[in-house]
Image: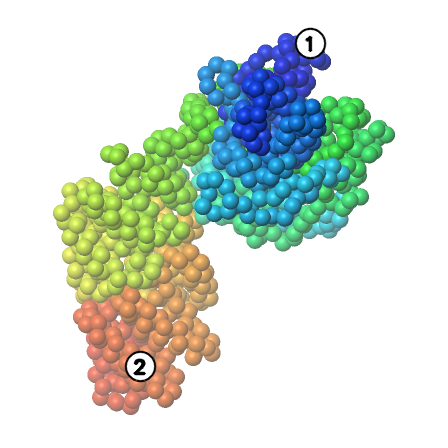
């Protein structure tokens, strides 16, 4: 009988010929067969269990020697059938056997082969049973059960062990056998699904099996329709895409630009279509720029952008100095002094050193799009950009490249993107033309197969079979042909094959994985190990890294993989780089490896990346990803945090993604580790504390609650306080929920006073408290907190001191301490003038408030506000542009009537950004007010009043101080409209404001003006005279230059004697 040990070597290591069972030498080349241990790996298999019915009765009726002879003959015949269909006998049980189809050699049609074998086994058993019944009067029957699924297959035991499979599918196959009828074959639902197009099956019924409380579905295998069997999957040449190709060339020939998306399922020819179009365009004096996205870099920020930029500037393969020189030669605007230079080089991964960037993701999006578009324009000829596999693009790159694609289309160039139907990113949304690929027609499919096979007459019939099996998928067709060539059925090369063997049937592959696994398993073991190691590295890899993790990598082995069309060489000098011929090849090679095997390789890759001479923290995210995949969670956590630290000044959103990954990793660490609690707290602290600047899926109430619970459990009050500060700021600034934040601010202040921490951390906490007190109208409390922060000045950075000093200046001015208040505001603005643009914008916003309240001459603030706006827009951070745009637009509107439209346009842009990103909603108090007043002046009075009323109510309940802005405008418009009930509503607005109990001169100005307007509308001359006089007197007392002209006009109309002060 044939055991599993002989199946450990299924192909000749010298020539690849399939070997006979127990062969000592290869029948083709004569090489000696060397036994090799088969390491465990994941396999898609069909498990067959066969068992003799009534074996105990049979044993009782025969002598042991007779029984041994019967079983020996039965299982020899059975094993021969299994072997004929490339199955492996994994176990003999005395009265039965277990066989595997798809291991150790992967079979694309393992389920179908198992079904054929099962029926053939029953056939030969019946023949043998007839002999036994005729000669010995013995009634012999078999039950057979089949089940398909993923198992771990390999040798068990040290040395030359037994090849077997482990996993749930094995047990289920045995249960199917026990439930099968005598002389029958029972298939599980998983097997039936794989062969339903090729097998005749009985009705699906529920059967009860041992070990399961519920019945499971199963069906009897009745027959296999051999004319329906097919196998293989591949990728054919571009055929049958004339219409789609014509669409692309027509767009190109019009001379107009455009953004085109080519969408289709894997294997339908998206890449081939894009490449053929690129060749067409290149032949017409058009530059071609091709970049690809990779599955393993989906989570690495800006990787796809870097590849696109490298392709645009044609610097792939160049060392950083040469690359920088070539880029500079193509970009006249670049100079060592330009801030664009480090931005561009950083985006391309060729920056010199690791200097802190002066830009963010949003800033680089704006500038890079301008620069890339400028390069295209400067070249003087059209360019066709092709971005392949955009379904694997990283988020930040998606945004930048989508913006660039839209911009470059206006230059007359074209941007073609290929991706799978499930992709719904920015590139999908920005495309203006769509080309969808479906399966090929029958005629086109046969033509595609004919191009692969060639014109030899022997291939005509086979070509028809292959075309039928491919079912319109060109990738299927090519892979089927390669599989046939690999099995010796075809001889020759692409376009010149001839049939050299018999092909009765072409089996339908269950999945792409099965087909590709079958091709991979035909490699020599050492070559297969190299391919598997490459799969762990990623879709693209270099020989140096591969040799580090797989030292036996040789040029011959790489050449073998290239020849097998499993990988392609993409670069030859200065370093050899390769990619997988198709992403699914990498997927199959990766998924087939045991987790432990992959973990060892991932760990080795992480170490190799760190040993690179050019290593920097830019690669920290990739190191973290490999370490996490290796199960080195503690180390992966540290690298995620390190990656976040590198990303924070460049792209806060990407940094937050790394912190979230660190949070997820920490949550999986054992509670017994003394550092686990701290590791769970730190990333949550960073996520919560930075919600002021970025609103994303990580900015949730749950994250804060988790931080609070963990910090209190560990008594880490400092981390809790830092997180609370960020939450308080976000609630007040982004959500206009300062009232809800006030209890939290009180709690934080109590915590801050008892925490021993550095001055910067304490100032961060107190700044959030002071701002919240100000937002709730507690100006004197806000002043005290701001003064407390300033007392930390010797040890505290200006990034915390300046906002506190600006707040103090605003509060002092509103309270009537005008001179020291304005002095503090000016000093704060000057202190931050040269700092980070977002810091400048966060301090400048206080000038917007004093300007909107009318407490200063807005012209005095205009220059600084404009400079801050320009810097924020150049840097590009969303939060910074909101704050700086709000400030500049607010001050500009109050400075010059001739620039009102410019100011209003900017404020509209800022409001749209706030609505889109849910940032800085508190600024809508003045923005919505200014826009509503403009709408009223343009004939939309009722709409303006409705908007102002809603705004007043929202801010009165959520951010009381800012209710003054919509409140004043609302009263003014109500008095002006003078419809029935308007004056009563205006009085109600004032009454609601008085209920707040604010005794603050700067906020009393608007209520005095409102009272004067209402008194005038009522015709109460005495009250009008008194309130107009009070309003003018307070304006003069506070030096409210922004209001004085209006106050004097109102007072003069009321008969008040005015005096210029």
x and y, in percent, of residue 50 in the image: 58, 31
Quarter where residue 457 is shown? top right
Pointer 1 or 2: first along the chain: 1
Q: Is residue 791 above or below residue 457?
A: below
At label 2, counting other C-alpha atoms closer than 10 Å, the crowd grade (few under 14, some 14-19, many 20 or more) is many
Judge left or right: residue 875 versus residue 759.
right
Q: How many marks?
A: 2
Task: Write down the quadrant of residue 462 in the picture.
Answer: top right
Quarter the C terminus occupies = bottom left
Residue with the mark numbered 2: 986
Q: Horizontal placement of 592 versus 797: left or right?
A: right
Give the image location of residue 958, x and y in percent.
29, 66
At a point 78% along the width and 27% down the height, the residue shown is 502
Q: Secondary structure at mark 2?
A: helix
User: Which SS class for mark 1?
Assistant: loop
- Position of 134 relative to 686 (above/below): above
Instruction: Tell me the residue at 63%/54% (across/down).
Output: 432
Which numbered marker is on residue 821?
none
| Mark 1 lies on residue | 30
Q: Residue furthest left?
A: 754
Q: Residues within 10 Å of mark 1 (few under 14, many from 20)?
A: few
Closest to the observer: 572 or 1040?
572
Nearest the camera: 118 or 721? Answer: 118
> In the figure, is residue 481 to the left or right of 1038?
right
Q: CA distance from mark 1 to mark 2?
A: 104 Å
> Can residue 401 be seen in the rendering of this structure?
no
Percent from the top left, x then y, of residue 72? Answer: 61, 20
Q: What residue appears at the point 26 percent right and 81 percent down from the top-left corner?
A: 1011
**Residue at 15% across, 57% down:** 784
């Amino acid at each position: 009988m044939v055991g599993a040990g002989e199946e450990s070597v299924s192909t000749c290591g010298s020539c690849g010929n399939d070997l006979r069972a127990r062969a000592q030498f290869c029948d083709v080349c004569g090489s000696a067969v060397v036994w090799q241990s088969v390491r465990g790996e994941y396999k898609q298999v069909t498990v067959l269990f066969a068992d003799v019915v009534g074996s105990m009765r049979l044993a009782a009726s025969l002598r042991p020697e007779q029984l041994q002879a019967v079983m020996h003959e039965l299982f020899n015949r059975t094993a021969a059938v299994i072997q004929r269909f490339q199955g492996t006998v994994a176990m003999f049980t005395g009265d039965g056997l277990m066989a595997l189809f798809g291991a150790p050699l992967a079979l694309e049609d393992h389920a179908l082969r198992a079904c054929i074998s099962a029926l053939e086994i029953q056939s030969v058993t019946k023949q043998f049973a007839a002999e036994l019944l005729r000669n010995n009067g013995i009634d012999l029957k078999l039950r057979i059960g089949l089940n398909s699924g993923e198992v771990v297959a390999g040798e068990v035991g040290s040395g030359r062990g037994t090849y077997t499979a482990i996993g749930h599918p094995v047990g289920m196959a045995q249960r199917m056998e026990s439930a099968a009828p005598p002389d029958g074959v029972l298939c599980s639902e998983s097997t039936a699904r794989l062969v339903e197009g090729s097998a005749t099956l009985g009705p699906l019924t529920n059967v009860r099996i041992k070990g399961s409380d519920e019945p499971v579905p199963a069906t009897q295998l009745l027959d296999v329709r051999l004319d329906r069997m097919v196998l293989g999957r591949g990728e054919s040449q571009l055929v049958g895409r004339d219409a789609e190709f014509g669409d692309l060339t027509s767009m190109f020939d019009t001379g107009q630009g455009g953004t085109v998306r080519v969408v289709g399922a894997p294997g339908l020819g998206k890449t081939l279509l894009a490449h053929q179009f690129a060749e067409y365009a290149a032949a017409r004096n058009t530059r071609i720029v091709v970049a690809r996205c990779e599955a393993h870099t989906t989570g690495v920020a800006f990787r796809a952008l870097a590849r696109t930029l490298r392709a645009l500037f044609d610097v792939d393969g160049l060392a950083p100095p040469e690359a920088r020189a070539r880029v500079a030669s193509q970009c006249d605007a670049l100079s060592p002094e330009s801030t664009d230079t480090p931005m561009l080089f950083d985006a391309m991964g060729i920056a010199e050193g690791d200097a802190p960037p002066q830009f963010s993701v949003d800033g680089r999006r704006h500038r890079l799009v301008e620069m890339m578009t400028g390069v295209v324009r400067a070249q003087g000829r059209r360019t066709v950009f092709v971005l392949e596999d955009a379904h694997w693009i990283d988020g930040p790159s998606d945004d930048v490249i989508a913006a660039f694609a839209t911009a470059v289309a206006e230059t007359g160039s074209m941007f073609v993107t290929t991706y799978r139907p499930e992709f719904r990113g920015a590139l999908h949304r920005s495309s203006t033309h769509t080309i969808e690929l479906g399966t090929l027609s029958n005629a086109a499919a046969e033509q595609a197969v004919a191009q692969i096979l060639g014109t030899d007459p022997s291939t005509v019939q086979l070509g028809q079979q292959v075309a039928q099996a491919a079912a319109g998928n060109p990738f299927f067709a090519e892979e089927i042909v390669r599989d046939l060539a690999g099995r010796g059925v075809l001889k020759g090369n692409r376009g010149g094959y001839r049939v050299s063997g018999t092909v009765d049937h072409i089996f339908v592959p269950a999945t792409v994985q099965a087909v590709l696994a079958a091709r991979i398993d035909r490699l020599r073991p050492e070559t297969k190990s190299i391919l598997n190691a490459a799969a762990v590295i990623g879709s693209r890899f270099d020989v140096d890294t591969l040799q580090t993790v797989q030292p036996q990598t040789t040029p011959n082995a790489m050449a073998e993989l290239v020849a097998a069309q499993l990988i392609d060489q993409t670069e030859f000098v200065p370093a050899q780089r390769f990619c997988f011929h198709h992403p699914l090849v990498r997927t199959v090679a990766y998924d087939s490896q045991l987790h432990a095997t992959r973990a060892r390789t991932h760990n080795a890759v992480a170490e190799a990346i760190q040993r690179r001479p050019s290593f920097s923290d830019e690669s920290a995210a990739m190191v973290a990803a490999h370490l996490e995949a290796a199960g080195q969670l503690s180390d992966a956590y540290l690298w995620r945090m390190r990656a976040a630290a590198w990303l924070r000044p460049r792209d806060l959103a990407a940094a937050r993604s790394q912190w979230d990954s660190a949070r997820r990793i920490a949550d999986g660490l054992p509670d017994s580790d003394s550092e686990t609690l701290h590791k769970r707290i730190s990333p949550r602290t960073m996520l919560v504390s930075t919600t002021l600047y970025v609103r994303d899926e990580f900015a949730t109430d749950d994250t804060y609650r988790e931080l609070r619970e963990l910090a209190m459990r560990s008594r880490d009050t400092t981390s809790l306080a830092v997180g609370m500060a960020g939450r308080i700021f976000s609630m007040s600034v982004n959500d206009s929920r300062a009232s809800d934040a006030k209890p939290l601010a009180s709690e934080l202040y109590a915590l801050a006073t008892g925490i021993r921490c550095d001055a910067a951390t304490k100032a961060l906490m107190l700044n959030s408290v002071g701002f919240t007190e100000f937002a709730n109208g507690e100006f004197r409390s806000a002043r005290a907190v701001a003064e407390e922060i300033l007392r930390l000045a010797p040890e505290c950075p200006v990034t915390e001191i300046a906002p506190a000093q600006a707040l103090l200046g605003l509060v002092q001015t509103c309270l009537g301490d005008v001179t020291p208040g304005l002095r503090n505001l000016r000093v704060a603005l000057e202190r931050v003038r040269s700092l980070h643009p977002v810091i400048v914008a966060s301090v400048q916003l206080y000038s917007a408030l004093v300007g909107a309240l009318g407490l200063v001459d807005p012209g005095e603030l205009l220059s600084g506000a404009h400079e801050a706006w320009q810097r924020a827009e150049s840097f590009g951070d969303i939060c910074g542009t909101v704050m700086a745009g709000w400030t500049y637009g607010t001050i500009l509107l109050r400075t010059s009537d001739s620039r009102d439209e410019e100011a209003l346009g900017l404020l509209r842009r800022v409001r749209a950004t706030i609505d889109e990103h849910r940032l800085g909603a508190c600024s809508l108090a003045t923005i919505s007010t200014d826009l509503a007043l403009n709408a009223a002046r343009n004939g939309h009075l009722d709409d303006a009043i409705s908007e102002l009323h809603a705004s007043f109510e929202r801010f009165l309940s959520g951010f009381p101080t800012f209710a003054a802005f919509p409140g004043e405008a609302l009263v003014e418009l109500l008095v002006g409209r003078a419809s029935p009930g308007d004056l009563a509503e205006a009085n109600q607005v004032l009454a609601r404001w008085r209920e707040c109990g604010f005794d603050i001169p700067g906020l009393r100005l608007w209520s005095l003006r409102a009272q004067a307007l209402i008194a005038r509308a009522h015709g109460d001359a005495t009250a009008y005279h008194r309130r107009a006089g009070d309003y003018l007197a307070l304006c003069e007392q506070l030096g409210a230059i922004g209001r004085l002209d209006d106050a004097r006009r109102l007072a003069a109309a009321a008969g008040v004697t005015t005096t210029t002060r």
